[in-house]
Amino acid sequence: MPGLHINDRQMRLYMRSRHTDTPAIAAARAGFSTATAYRIEADPRLPSQKKASRGRRRPDPLAGVWDSEIVPMLTVAPGIRAVAIFEEICRRHPEIGPGVAGRWSGASERGGP
C-alpha cells in the first residue's frame, strides 16, 4: 500500500518466500509492491536495522507563533483561508514572512501569487 513503511515481519516473510518464489510473488505474500521487492533485493537489511531519517533540515519558522497565534485564529474562525492567516502573521511579524514561503511574500501587494 503506498505510503506505508514495511516492517520486520513483512521483510522476514518476503525473504523466506524469496527462496522459492519470484520477487513479485514473494512481495505479494508479504503485502507490498514488486518495486519494493526489488528495492529490498538491493538493500536486504531489516527496517529496524536501517538508519533513522534525520527529520527537519531547517528550523520551523512558524514554531514560535503556532500555539500562541495561529491555533487561536483557527479556533475562532475555522473556515479562514490559509493565505489570510499567512498574511496576518506577516503583518504582525515582518521577520517571519521572507523565510516561510517566498512565493506568497507580498502576494497581496502584487495582486496575486
Image (cartoon, grey):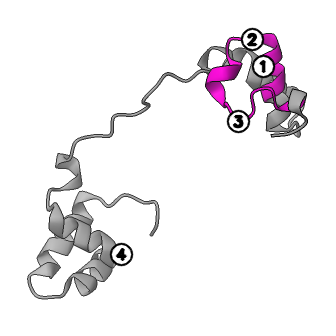
Crowding at label 4, few (<14), some or many (≥20) Cα neighbours within 10 Å? Answer: some
The answer to which image quadrant residue 60 occupies is top right
**Distance from label 3 to label 1 (Cα)?**
15 Å
Q: Which residue matches tag 3?
A: 103
Q: Position of residue 13 (x, y in %)?
A: 20, 72
Tell me if residue 95 comes above or below residue 28 in the rendering: above
**Distance from label 1 to label 2 (Cα)?**
6 Å
Q: Nearer the viewer, residue 92 or 27?
A: 92
Q: Secondary structure at mark 1?
A: helix
Cβ–Cβ under 8 Å for marks 1 and 4: no
Q: Which residue matches tag 1?
A: 89
Cβ–Cβ under 8 Å for marks 1 and 2: yes
The residues colored magenta run 86-108
Q: Residue at x 75, y 25 (%)?
A: 71
Q: Position of residue 87 (x, y in %)?
A: 82, 25
Q: Which residue matches tag 4?
A: 33
Choose mark 3 or mark 4, whichever is in front: 3
Residue 95 is inside the magenta segment = yes
Q: Earlier in the sequence, mark 4 or mark 2?
A: 4
Q: Secondary structure at mark 4?
A: loop
Q: Residue at x 91, y 36 (%)?
A: 111
Q: Secondary structure at mark 3?
A: loop
